[in-house]
Amino acid sequence: LRAPPAQAEPLWWERATATLKRHAAHGTPRYVYHPGIVRRRARELAGIGAIDQRFFAIKANPHPGILRVLEAEGFGFECVSLGELRHVREALPGLSPERILFTPSFAPVDEYAAALDGGVNVTVDNAALLRAAPGVFRGRRLLLRLDPGFGEGHHEKVRTGGREAKFGLPLDGLPEFLAALREVDARIIGLHAHIGSGILEAGHWREVYARLASVADSLGSVEVIDVGGGLGVSYEPGGDRFDLDGYAAMLGEMKATWPQYRLWVEPGRYLVAEAGVLLARITQVVEKSGVRRIGLDAGMHSLLRPALYNAWHRIENLSRQGESEGEPAEVVGPICETGDVLGRRRRLPDSSAPGDLVAIGHAGAYGAVMASRYNLRGLPEEDLIEEPLDE
Ligand code: LLP
């Protein structure tokens, strides 16, 4: 890991301590979201003229307040389960079904049936599905998810293309798929690919787009090309940021080469990661065999990403802002697993003590929604900041 620069730019939540303390008074662990940050990211993407429709991948953060912000910004919503479909419908009752995209993986066939009957856009990715339930797919207009043959992302567990990944139809599976498609008299009106998550370089999507477009040209029925989500954010202060300009320029070129296809994207993380902070309190500070551990009431049950992907999240002691960095310590949670570590070798102030309020940054994506009941500790609370705040 890159060493953070001495003077990292302060994040919104480091300047909103009073607001966060008010929220924390209602209990921790607690996620707090800043809608202004979501809106700002949404508008950045809206500024990319080549994109015809943006869908928010709600798996990253289905908080209804966030969905409402993105609906108002013109986003559609990408769902991967019947639960997510119902959730969007309930949170956004006026939303038209064309603004929903259903992209599940190995889902039960009745979920596909419900989505198709509801009039939403549906993506399929194998012939077995069509053969198992011909009645469900008969005469339908569908999107086809392709595996472009490679994956990308911040961790091997989030690369969703290539041989090891379970997603998408490989290009050599096309003839068999098309035969199954003809048997049910369905039509492919869109091609889809999502190669992975947490990608910072824009170049990979050029390859994805080119492969989808060449298949689209050969099929003749395609109206839409969806290049998925995967846009990364910089978790470390001073780390590489997503190359938004490069992304916009690349999509512009693709669109200029293939103007006949409408372009869809489905980002999750990029819109919400920085907007969320997880608040926790210090439970105990313990020195054991030369290792100092700062214990929190939040752990892998509240934010799984560090335990699952070794993900790095900024951790600050909000009760001791301005105090100098202390000796390196392990920041751990209260779960009965050795892997319940939120941060390794972190330099929180040496005065850090039980009751202090700690913030874990960039927790707005794949945070609360991946929390679990493990050890029966209860799920974290979630708040949307209502008052206007600096961005
Ligand atoms: N579209 C599809 C079909 C997806 O599977 C995903 C994410 C997205 C869009 C949105 O990807 P994003 O823009 O957020 O990268 N839990 C992991 C991330 C898993 C992403 C799964 N699929 C993490 O915390 O890093």
Image (cartoon, rainbow, N blue to C red):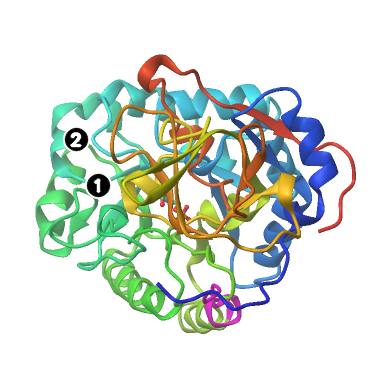
- Tell me, yes or no, whether the two marked residues, 2 and 1, touch with CB atoms within 8 Å: yes
- Kind of residue at disc 1: Asp
Which residue is located at x 63 percent, y 77 percent?
Answer: 6
Left or right of 324 in this view: 256: left
CA neighbours of label 1 inside 10 A, class few (<14), some (14 to 19), many (20+): many
Q: Is residue 252 left or right of residue 356?
A: left
Under circle 2, the secondary element is helix
Q: Which residue is mark 2?
A: 129
**Residue 249: in sight, yes or no?**
yes
Q: Is the residue marked by circle 2 packed among few (<14), some (14-19), or many (20+) residues within 10 Å?
A: some
Check residue 150 in the rendering and tell me which mark sits there, or answer none: none
Q: Quadrant of the N terminus?
A: bottom left
Q: Position of residue 146 (x, y in %)?
A: 26, 58
Residue nearest the viewer, comparing 185 with 48: 48
Task: Look at the image and say whether residue 246 sits in the magenta stretch.
Answer: yes
In this picture, residue 81 sits left or right of residue 146: right
Closer to us: 320 or 199? 320
Q: How many marks?
A: 2
Q: Amino acid at mark 2?
A: Leu
The Cα–Cα distance between marks 2 and 1, rounded to whole angstroms, is 8 Å
Residue 333 at what x, y percent from top left?
Answer: 44, 35
Give how far across and how far down residue 86 sits, in percent.
52, 23
- On screen, 323 above or below 272? below
**Residue at screen point 68% across, 60% down:** 41
* Figure check: 101 above or below 378: below
The residue segment tinted magenta is 239-248
Residue at x 65%, y 26% (from the top left corner): 91
- Spot the residue most to the top: 376
Element assignment for label 1: loop
| Quadrant showing the C terminus | bottom right
The residue labelled by disc 1 is 125
